[in-house]
Image (tube, grey):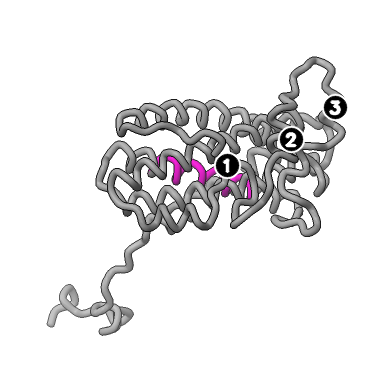
Amino acid sequence: MTAESAPDPSVTADDTARPARKVTRTQWAAITAVVLALVFAGTAAVASAGRDGDSAAPRTPATGSADAGFARDMAVHHQQAVEMSFIVRDSTDDEEVRRLAYDIANTQANQRGMLLGWLDMWGLPKVESGREPMAWMSMDKAMDHGDGGMDMGAMDHGASGHQARDGSLMPGMATKTELDRLREARGKAAEILYLQLMTDHHEGGVAMAQGCVQLCAPGTEKDLAEGMVAAQQSEMKLMADLLAARGAKPRTGG
């Protein structure tokens, strides 16, 4: 046996016999979210330090601030959108709906990673006991805007117009019963239910993001919230078209 053909002593029989490990799409989404969270956390720190001039440390939001509340609540809200999108991708062969679901899953998983990354950077808990979801949207600070910029309808809808039930913690979130129906549905029925549930979900998400636009401190998180509003409103229009093509429409009062 020549030197070129000699086996590598560091490779064992188990190594050669073991099949290559596949990375699932859920793992890829999680990996991407972590990477983007680190990138955006660093960007936010640099940007904040630049705004503070000679300040030695970036501004850190208080745990009860709108900034922290939005990050916590939107991370939870996004997680359900990711879950619903993966469910429908396995329930239909329709390429339009599967493409939309893939885009929503990846976008919201990445944004969720950013939000959780900011909480880590700020040294704040990801879950705050004793505080109701979206309580930050009814803060007295909202009343300080004298330019009429605050959407009080969205505030009422988000802070006090929703009763948590059956796993639906915030406006737009599907209940456990609805998620079970989505898991059981197939084909066109799954497509319609997903589009209806996701339209409701986006409506709640847009109201929450608009709250952050009004209440969060200027910076990367507020910019992200503005982008969420524009993107999710655009997706709602697309979902209305997809529903109409299937002889259905968004739910009323969902």
User: Which residue matches tag 2?
Assistant: 48
120 vs 77, left or right, is right
Which segment did they paint magenta? 102-116
User: Residue 213's image quarter?
Assistant: top right
- Give the quarter of the figure containing the N terminus: bottom left
Residue 195, disc: none
Say what secondary structure mark 3 lies in. Answer: helix
Nearer the camera: disc 1 or disc 2: 1
Which of marks 3 and 2 precedes in the sequence?
2
> Quick one: label 1, few (<14), some, or many (20+) residues within 10 Å?
many
Q: Position of residue 87 (x, y in %)?
A: 39, 53
User: Which residue matches tag 1?
Assistant: 172
Residue 143, disc: 3
Mark 1 vs mark 2, CA separation in Å: 32 Å
> Quick one: label 2, few (<14), some, or many (20+) residues within 10 Å?
some
The residue type indicated by label 3 comes to Met
Which of marks 3 and 1 precedes in the sequence?
3
Mark 1 vs mark 3, CA separation in Å: 25 Å
- Give the quarter of the figure containing the C terminus: top right
Q: Position of residue 114 (x, y in %)?
A: 60, 45
Is 29 magenta? The answer is no
Residue occupying the point 45% across, 33% down? 250
